[in-house]
Structure formats: C-alpha cells, structure tokens
Image (spheres, coloured by chain):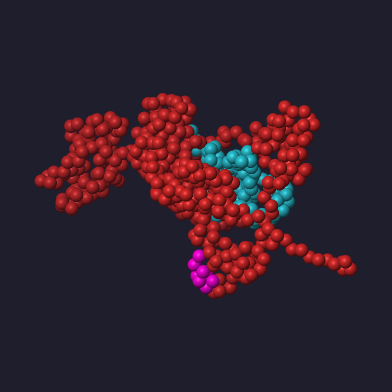
Amino acid sequence: MGKFNVLNHELVPEHYVLDSKEEEKVLRELGITKDLLPKINKSDPAIIALEQSHGDINPGSVIKIVRKSPTAGISVYYRVVVSGETVR
Amino acid sequence: MKYLIFRDSKRNMESLMKKAPCGYAVDFSPGKENSPDAILVTTDSKNAIYRIEYSSIKKYSDDENIVKKVSKGLKSTIMIDGVKGIDPIPLASFTFKKGASLIKDKFIVGSMETMDGITKESAMENVSDVTVEIMNDALKAGADIPFSLASELATLKKKVSKKEFSEIFQRSIAEFKQREIDPYEAVGIIAAQSIGEPGTQMTMRTFHFAGVREMNVTLGLPRLIEIVDARRVPSTPSMTIYLRHEYEQSREVVEKVMREIENTTLIDVCELETDISEMTVTVKPIPNRLRERLVSGEDIFNVVSDPKTLKGAIVMEREKGNEVTVKPQQESFKNLYKLQEQLKSLTIKGIPGIKRAIARNEKGAWVIYTQGSNFRDIIEKVEEIDATRTYTNDIMEIYNVLGVEAVRNAIYLESERTLSEQGLEVDQRHLMLVADMMTFSGNVRAVGRQGISGKKSSVLARAAFEITTKHLLKAGISGEVDALNGVAENIIVGQPITLGTGSVNLVYKGFGSK
C-alpha cells in the first residue's frame, strides 16, 4: 500500500493544472489578471499530491478546481499557485 | 523511487554546476544499486538540496574531463549532464536500508514511498452531451446556467416535444436572469445578516449528546464561533471513522480497530504497587483488562524496559505472571514518586490524541466515533479504515492534511450542520461565501480582527473596524496610501460608495461635443 493520496479524499475536489493556453483563455473569460485569483500554497497537500503525477508545479500556475456543489451540481473554481507555506 | 544520496561540500557542487556536462569522480562505488532513479546531494546531512542529472556511472579511470572530489581513493565516475538546486528534502523522509547511515562523505541508497494514484472518478464524466449543449445554448442567450439546472432541462428534453421544450427553455432562462445577483450587489452584507439573524436564536451554551452515548460534542453558537474563528484546536475534537467496504460489517474488525487506535496507558491495564521499604514500583498487569485491550504481558515489559521511555530507572528482572519491578536509579522518595507518576502515564499502544472510541452500527455498516482527533496518524497508520471517507471536526487538521480546498468544504459542511441541528435554515450560498472568503488567500483566515477584516488593504476600512488608533498610527509611520476603492473608506470621506448605482459613472456628452 502506498501513501494515501489526499486527492482521493471525499472532501478534496478535483484539481487540474492548466497549461498556458488554457490559462490565457480562462483569464480572458473572467476578465481579470492572475493576481486577482484566489490563491493556493505551493506546499498545499493537494498540490504536493498533484506534483506526483504532473511534475513540478511552479508558483504562478493556475489550478482548475472542479467542485461538487449542492446548489450548482458542478462548479468550477480557479486558484493561482503562490509560494506560501502551509503551516504544519 | 530509489535514490542515491551522498554528502558533498557546497563549493564542489557549485563548481560542478558551472562545468557540467562533465564527469565527476567520487570516492564510492554504488555496487549493485548502480541505477538509481535519481542522485541527490546533501551538504549538511539533514536535507538533500541538489539533484544531479546523470547519464551513467562508470568505474573510475584517469581522464581529462573529470572533476575530482578528493585527490585519493576515487572509485567511480558519474557522467553528469547537469546539477540543479532543488527545494530541500529532509533526509528523514527517505526510508533507508537497515544499518545505512550518512556519516562523513558516505553514500546511501534510500527509497521514498510514492503516493497512490487517483481512483476517484471525475464529476465531469457523468455530464451528458445534451447537458453541455443546453449550457452552451444558454450562454448564447446570455445566461451562465449551472450544471444542476442544465441537467434538469436535459431530462425534460426527452419527455416533451420540441416546441414545448423551447418554451420551457426560454422561460427558465428568463427566470434565471431575473434571479441572478446584480453586479455590485453587497453579497457580503446580505450573508452576514442572513447568518447573524438566526444566530441570535441559537442557544448560548448547549452541550448535548449527539445520539452517541457518553460522547460530548460542542454544538450551537459556541461551535459556530469556533468555526469562523478558525481555532487551532476545537474544544471537542472528534473523528468519524469509516471502515473499508470489505470490513464494514464485521464486528471483530471494528473491535480490533477500536482497540488499536484507543490510546492505552499503563494505568488502564495494570496496577501499580509501590514498596517504600524496598524503593521499588511493581507493575502488575490485570489479566482481564489485558484481554479487553488486546495487550500482552510482553508488550508491557517491552514498553517499561525501553530505555528511551523511562529515564533514570532500573528495570529489574521479570517475575512470574508478567510482573515487572522498576527501581529509581538514585534512591530517594522524590525519585520514587516521580517514577510512579511516569509509569502511570506511559503509553503502551494506540494513536496519540484518541481518548476514546465508540462504534455504532448505521444501516448495517459499522462506524467508529472518537473523542480526540489525530487525522494524519489515523489515515496513515490504520490499514482497515477507509481513508477517503474518514472525517474530523478539527478544521485546522483538515487544512494541514488535505489542503485549502478540503478545508473550504469542511468549513461549509460544519457550519451547515451546526445551523441545521438547531433547526435553523440559512441559504447554503451564504455559508459557501463565508467558506470561500476564509480560504481565499490559500491559508485559513478567521473572520474578524485577526483574519479577513484585519488584512484588508485599505487603512480606513481597517481603522473603521477595530483598534482604530493602532492602524492609523501604523499607516502614518509607514506612509500608506489609501486608494478609496472600498465601501467603508468612501463612507468615511463622504463619497458615494461603490455599490449598486454608486458603482457606475454617468457622463453627459451633450449634443454638440464629441
């Protein structure tokens, strides 16, 4: 048994890393710059788990989060990776 | 993943960085393990901070293009493509072969456990093409409708005629547009009032038994305050542990897991007898309790005789019936008393923090509720549990183990549960907004002076909230600039606020001018 992958937990929604093309498209649709997006720390457990399959994720990457929402069914959210520390 | 880790000086690595690609002669030979997945270098024996990209490892031979590590005793050459500085990886996170240690320039082979792949199915997979089509049509009509509405329309589409459907579609879009929140609507204030009003009807201090015998859970207003304050530790931490589907119905497995996680101390299963004339403490296991908690006499002896757990004590020989006699190293009544207290609280087994575990049968499946919480240890150490469903009410613990997105869900779920348990109905979207705001920065921030309100960018807005003088003084000293973008600061200076109609500017062009 490997280490538990936090992305499998019920509470954790799906995380995807966007490539630069998709990033641009999303920002254009929302009409904002990257620094206005909600943030996620580089040391966040979900990012660390994502790095296992995706390789290094640098600060500045945009993460697409697909949440299950009780009102909207599925809702899509975006967070930008910052170099903050998730305190342990 | 297999790693080869060795110790080297910073200077050597820096010169390698410049010279690469080249050969690097080192004073060890990896032997059988000659194809590690990666080579890491540590400079302080604590963290690996360089990663070497290599093409092969050869036997050492004197050659021109080789950077030497030391002058004598060179054994092999690593053909280096490049050296990269990496984020420090603590050596403690590797598992090494028994007996391997990193003393002075020695190399070791370690491995790191990799994580499981993702097994959860994607929510997007269940979305039918029809649903997506309807969403796109709606978007063209100027309404960004949610998936839930689109999928409802999709099921309707099968049942009704084309004409009827287009009528339904038109009307739903119109209804949706009418109910949309307008730009610059003060959603935060509405959320605050919508949560605040039912909050006044909550009972101030209710500790009641949430259907589980002998289990105390904070509920009502104190719990709600605890959630929005993002307290490090809740007043009554508690976990809900689910078992893997294959064990779910077995009583034996549930009992085994419960005993495994319940923190058992020596005093729970033994009697302590202090002999003042002999200056000894005798640990006498009680057979019934040993059986109950699945502890063997051997376990007790091992724990007591471990030199790390009991300092300044001599463990005497084992007597009949698993009794163990312990003596303080320096004979004095003070030391004897100390030893006795130490023995009482000695942990034999279990997971730290879990004080009690209670199992309940819910619709044929066993669920364990615990008093005390230790999320990380439970999901990593106990094999029989279903880690994907296991839950704790300790919000900060969820943040540390599962991350911001999980904590957003946890904040929402916990506050929703607290309110609905009191029979209060608050629209889910208000609670979602609170959860989103608390996790906006990537960290969990409390609502209030220490968190969201205290971190606003505008000085005047902060000063209007709490501790006015401190903020104004600090802003004066550091020369802060207030751009007057928010609501509070514009009220202070007497300008129209940026909400509703105040957010748009109307300019009269006149007839003649351009």
- The residue depicted at 80 percent of the width and 31 percent of the height is B163
Q: Main secondary structure of the magenta part?
A: helix
- The residue depicted at 43 percent of the width and 45 percent of the height is B219
Vertical placement of residue B324 versus B504, above or below: above
Q: Residue furthest left?
A: B277
| Number of numbered labels in the structure image | 0
Which shade of the palette goes to chain B? Answer: red
Relative to B446, is A18 on the left or the right? right
Percent x, y for residue B159?
A: 72, 27
Q: Quadrant of residue B122?
A: top right
Q: Quadrant of residue B275?
A: top left
Q: Which chain is cyan?
A: A
Which residue is at the front of the view, B500 or A40? Answer: B500
Percent x, y for residue B256?
A: 37, 30
- The residue depicted at 72 percent of the width and 39 percent of the height is B172
Q: Residue furthest right?
A: B512
- The residue depicted at 18 percent of the width and 43 percent of the height is B281
Percent x, y for residue A28?
A: 73, 51
Tell whether position B71 is magenta. Answer: no
Percent x, y for residue B453?
A: 54, 60
Res. B80 visible in picture: no
Vertical placement of residue B182 versus B165, above or below: below
Q: Which residues are magenta?
A: B466-474
